[in-house]
Amino acid sequence: MAMLSSKKIVNEVELKEYIMRIIYFAPIAFNGLKQRPQHIAELLSKRHEIWYVEPTISLMRYILKGGRSYKKEKYDINSNLHIIKLDGKFTAHISLQVIDYFKLNTVSEKIQLSKIIENCDAIWVGYCGWYDIISNVNDKKIVYDKMDDDASITQNKLLCNLIQAVEPKLIKKADVIFVTAIKFYQELSLKRGNVYYVPNAFNKDIEYNAQTKIKNDSGNIIFGYVGTIAHWFDMKAIEIILAANEKNYVHLVGPLHIPKIMHDRIKYIGEVPKKEIGKYINSFDICLYPFVQSTFLDTIDPVKIYEYLALNKPIIAVDSVETRKYGNLINRYHNYNELEKILQLKLSLPFTTKEECVRYLEDNTWEKRVEMIEEHL
């Protein structure tokens, strides 16, 4: 027993002292709405050195749509976390790579990243569209963090074709694969080893950010949603909520990518700073997860539900593989008839006491998820 204990202590010491240099190919800009990629990169940087590579903005896209510049940007979040956006002057839109048979579109990006890739210990791929850049790298550990069914999310046909072409290659090449959804785990673990289920989580600071509450003294019932509003969002469910009671109001917090419903009891708040998300959730009487029923739905592990539960809010959510894991903590509907019945009920809080809430959520912070990741790395 003494020998085993000593060995365990040595291994723990070695783990604490082992520092990796990781290049993190991210799906989103670091300063955007803070999601899984930024949380993981930031927490890994507490012990490891991270180069967080943002999606390249091509000159073509900048000319056509404007917005953020195509020029190179580089800055540090801390001494271990370096943010890089590559120069997109000689790079076309990523979707065109599906017809780029000679891989010319990634030449500029490869040159700009060559020294970092050469000196890194591991390559983290947070979006399979980066595959062509690392396809010929054979002397580094490759980690694939499969967060979404990217082919179903995009409505760009060329980009969808690219994803379908390169993702199987990335899955085969990766040394380790992390997945957010049970469905992903079931599918990939049948094909290969080193697949680990690491679900999403919530920012433990959300409770502190919720202290300044937006008051509701109107006597109305505020149904609220936080997140992107795009083609997967079920506007029909919102119409049903509004029709159920003239005191029902809906507040939608997040970027809007589909046409609005023009209704005097819908408030479109738009994108807000991540540090204010808790404040808005705290202002809702009932929180919503109203996505369109589809097979795509079973691949989403919604961060918003972790956040709603962290603030102990009643939740109405569409049924899916990922929402079933919450059991009686949330109110699920399979169809609009069930939604109408739920709307007639007086919904109770998920947790009876603060202690119950803390006990449930203490293992669902991003810190806990990164502990799991480091064990496997």
Image (spheres, rainbow, N blue to C red):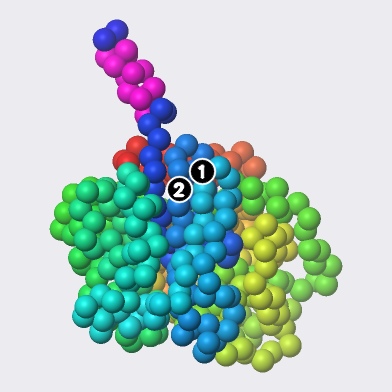
Q: Which residue is mark 1?
A: 80
Q: Farthest residue in the top direction?
A: 2
What amino acid type should be assigned to the residue bearing mark 1? Asn
Question: Looking at the picture, how far across and down is residue 17, in whole percent?
Answer: 41, 27
Q: Residue 140: where, in percent of width, then height?
A: 26, 48
5 falls in the magenta region: yes
Q: Is residue 198 magenta?
A: no
Between residue 163 and residue 230, name the one nearer to us. 163
CB atoms of marks 1 and 2 within 8 Å: yes
For disc 2, the marked residue is 50
Q: Which mark is residue 143?
A: none
Q: Residue at x 35, y 25 (%)?
A: 14
> Residue 350 vs residue 177: left or right?
right
Q: Which residues are magenta?
A: 4-15
Q: Earlier in the sequence, mark 1 or mark 2?
A: 2
Q: Classify mark 2: residues with Cα within 10 Å, few (<14), some (14-19) or many (20+).
A: many
